[in-house]
Amino acid sequence: MRETQHIVKSYDEELQSISTRIIEMGGLVEAQLADAIEAVVKRNAQLGAQTDQRDSQVDAMEREIDEAVVRLLARRQPMADDLRQVLAALKIVGILERCGDYAAHVGKRAVMLAQDRETPGIAVIGRMGKMVRDLIGDVLGAYARRDPELALSVWRRDQDLDQLYASFFRELLTAMAEDPKNINACMHLLFIAKNIERVGDFATNIAENVHFLVLGVLPAGKRPKAAKGDYSFEQ
Amino acid sequence: MDEAMTGMNEEVGLSFGADDSEPLGQTPGSASGAETPAKFVSRGVDVFYGAKQALFSIDIDIMPNEVTALIGPSGCGKSTFLRCLNRMNDIIDGCRFSGSIVLDGEDIYARAIDVVHLRARVGMVFQKPNPFPKSVYENVAYGPRIHGLASSTADMDEVVRTSLERAGLWEEVKDRLHEPGTGLSGGQQQRLCIARAIAVEPEVILMDEPCSALDPIATARIEELIDELRTNYTIVIVTHNVQQAARVSQRTAFFHLGKLIEFGDTDQIFTNPRAERTRDYITGRFG
Ligand SMILES: Nc1ncnc2c1ncn2[C@@H]1O[C@H](COP(=O)(O)OP(=O)(O)OP(=O)(O)O)[C@@H](O)[C@H]1O
Ligand SMILES: [Mg+2]
């Protein structure tokens, strides 16, 4: 991220390689999310199952990057920007792994949902999915380019996703109240929406790490949050 | 992110690049933010060796019962500054000092100052362990004897014992007190030199790369000792090992080409230095 190089060249290469692999891992998680959401929206059970299975690749990447970070910590004792870079890497990798888990959950539910009756509101999942993919895509771009402004914009924009989630939550409640036969499918949608909303939160956590990595401080103030009221629904 | 990190929320570091005349970091005079008066206050310190200027207007406050680390590339003036603090530069031919260094409110460069007394208050430990070619006991007893700090043999035994204990060496040498100090291992010799410095009851201990001749275990013991000594003494240490500065000190001063580039809390310097040159140095980007 800086023009001046380390006196020990292999140190630069190791740091660079960790960064590159995180971006790759992020790309995989993005693809997983995209597939899982498509599987829901298109009622594609096969795609959903694939997404679930591919999660082990994300886990493997996490382990690999963790090991590289541990080796680098032990051998180089990074300081200052380098230290922040390594700490951020460690945290971002952990967050991405959890995003991967949520994508797999969504994939799993897509399988079950495809076998259930069609329900209204599935299009909202598509919209939430698009929002969350933008957040994740932007925050990965912010990481790749070390761009704290873009990170901040992700950090602020997540509230839109929260808002959409809250109104969808109400919509689903109404649908279930209107026709109890909808309950099963609506519950799946509810969990899916909740998972997507959580991934949005993770995008903001990554954004905080990018901000810290570049500037050495967390974003100032509290993250703007849409009032969740009674619609918060912890799994 | 974690609560633990939110303490770092203050707005800093957006504009890097130290201006040559103004070191980044704490404003002199408000070094700790608290009321504790500084042990040493250095203002506008210039040092010349003949025509060559080695230090340029150094302002630093050294806080009591803290370890202050001086770091920077070779030749940047760390040792020169350290030697200013007990006027060891006086004995170097052609070395000229200007500016002021105040120890507990008293200008140590004032005419009335007794330099021998000053050096008893401000002791020094050197890079290479340099015990006198005498017994372990005599090495420690020498200082207290010339300063008249022990009135009887029993008193002296006590001074020797407590000094060796504080230096973490007593257990290893209590049965060989009358053997030559030069017969100890390098790490033991360095602790003997620390015991010797402590024996005259100094207030400040200056250390110039005290571990550079030691292995990692002996180094760790000295670092542990430095941390313990901090309760009773003020310590200023010059080190080439930035990791060591990070481990042992509370405050770090980064020197470059005779100037103080940045001075601040060690935690801040090693996680988020403000000056580009500090960052380059501690991350291993220039030598
Ligand atoms: N006795 C001396 N006579 C002439 N010049 C000297 C003397 N001692 C130091 N210098 C010069 O003053 C500058 C600062 O030296 P100093 O020893 O303080 O550096 P340092 O930071 O301690 O370096 P190192 O890390 O190599 O010990 C150097 O340019 C050095 O050559
Ligand atoms: Mg030196």
Image (cartoon, helix red, strand yellow):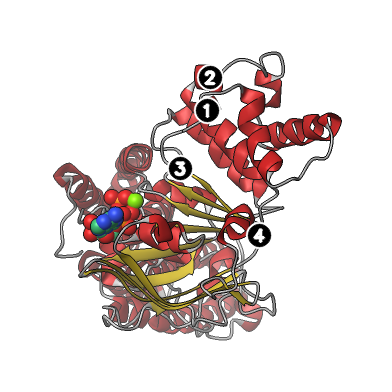
Where does the image place residue B77, in percent across and percent down from the top left? 32, 61
**Disc 1 + disc 2, Cβ < 8 Å:** yes
Residue that appears at 70% across and 39% down: B145
C-alpha gap between disc 1 and disc 2: 6 Å
Determine which residue is flagged by label 1.
B189
Query: Looking at the image, which residue is at 66% across and 47% down?
Result: B229
Quadrant of res A157: bottom left
Amino acid type at circle 1 is: Gln
Q: CA distance from mark 4 to mark 3?
A: 20 Å
Q: Chain of mark 2?
A: B
**Residue carrying label 3:** B126
Query: Is residue A185 something that shows in the picture?
Result: no
Question: Residue B33: x and y, percent?
Answer: 61, 79
Query: The residue marked by circle 3 belongs to what chain?
Result: B
- Tell me the mark number nearer the camera, choosing from 4 and 2: 2
Q: In this figure, which residue is indicated by the disc labeled 2?
A: B184
* Residue B65, numbered label: 4
Residue at 68% in and 34% down: B141
